[in-house]
């Protein structure tokens, strides 16, 4: 690591080493993987991973999180949770309500296993956007060691690569509820349809993708390099036919590409102001 990144890493390790033990809210994403592995290096056996499995988290993410924890010999608990009652209609303050509910539950699970400090993978870049869920984390006194030690997303990817973690280049991901407009009743069948569509697109090589959905419309957002690939390889018909098999009636490609909060552009009259 260069000296700047090394200084941040040493600060992170110092924070972790000062704790008696830690439970990590573990999604299997870039940030939480890096934090979990750093905690393992700093604390040995005094760390556990807690993963929430809800209908709005893709099955492949849960499977991947489990495999990472097992490979690194870290105690791992998967907690099955239905869609919380307070977010069944996907309200505008969904992220705050969801994190309050889930992290309150995770703190309880951690304490049952003898851990009184719960940490998440929030990083310095998360403070630059509107992220209502961070308010819940502050209120619940959830630790954010990556933020405290000044790690940005780019720092985490660089450090992860140097540590040999394959997740260094894993695309950012967000829960499936971010694919739906606010004030839309959450439907398990629709979530599975979105999951199947995104899994298919990832499998054919479109690694960073969102399938924004309203009723039977699928609006595909992806990075410019993948839009170019779709044009170059003539994948329009193939993608459209497959997504229609999953239950969509209309399939569109958003020419502006992937961006956080992208669904509000199409459904702005519904009052969306979300950031993933």
Image: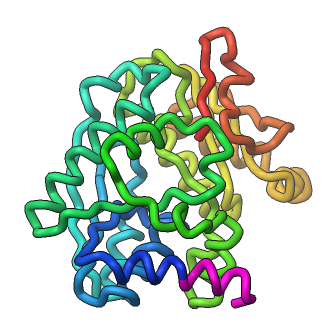
Q: Residue at x 64, y 89 (%)?
A: 162
Q: Is residue 7 magenta?
A: yes
Chief secondary structure of the magenta portion? helix
Give the quarter of the image for residue 3.
bottom right
Residue 142: horizontal and vertical position, in percent? 35, 53
Residue 201: horizontal and vertical position, in percent? 63, 54
Q: Residue at x 23, y 62 (%)?
A: 78
Residue 27: horizontal and vertical position, in percent? 41, 61
Direction from residue 72 to residue 220 in the image, left or right:
right
Residue 137: horizontal and vertical position, in percent? 39, 45
Q: Residue at x 62, y 76 (%)?
A: 168
Asked whether 228 or 41 is in front, the reply is: 41
Direction from residue 43 to residue 14 in the image, left or right:
right
Q: Which residues are magenta?
A: 1-10
Give the quarter of the image for residue 154.
bottom right
Q: Quarter holding the N terminus?
A: bottom right
Q: Number of marks in the image?
A: 0
């Amino acid at each position: 690591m260069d000296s700047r990144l090394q200084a941040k890493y040493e600060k992170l390790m110092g924070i972790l080493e000062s704790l008696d033990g830690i439970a990590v809210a573990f999604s299997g994403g870039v940030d939480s993987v890096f934090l979990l592995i750093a905690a393992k290096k700093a604390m040995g056996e005094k760390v556990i991973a807690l993963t929430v499995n809800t209908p709005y988290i893709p099955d492949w993410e849960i499977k991947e999180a489990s495999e990472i924890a097992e490979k690194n010999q870290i105690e791992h608990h998967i907690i099955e949770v239905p869609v919380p009652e307070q977010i069944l209609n996907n309200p505008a303050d969904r992220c705050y309500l969801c994190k309050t509910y889930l992290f309150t539950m995770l703190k309880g699970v951690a304490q049952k296993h003898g851990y009184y400090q719960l940490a998440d993978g929030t990083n310095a870049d998360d403070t630059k956007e509107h992220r209502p869920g961070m308010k819940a984390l502050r209120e619940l006194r959830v630790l954010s060691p990556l933020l405290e030690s000044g790690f940005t997303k780019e720092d985490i990817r660089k450090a992860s690569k140097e540590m040999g973690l394959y997740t260094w280049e894993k695309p950012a991901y967000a829960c499936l509820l971010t694919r739906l407009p606010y004030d839309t009743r959450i439907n398990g069948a629709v979530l599975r349809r979105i999951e199947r569509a995104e899994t298919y697109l990832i499998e054919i090589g479109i690694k960073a993708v969102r399938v924004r959905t309203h009723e039977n419309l699928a609006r595909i957002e992806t990075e410019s390099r993948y839009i170019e690939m779709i044009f170059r390889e003539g994948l329009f018909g193939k993608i459209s036919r497959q997504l229609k098999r999953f239950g969509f009636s209309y399939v569109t490609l958003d020419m502006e590409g992937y961006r956080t909060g992208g669904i509000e552009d199409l459904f702005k009259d519904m009052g969306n102001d979300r950031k993933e």
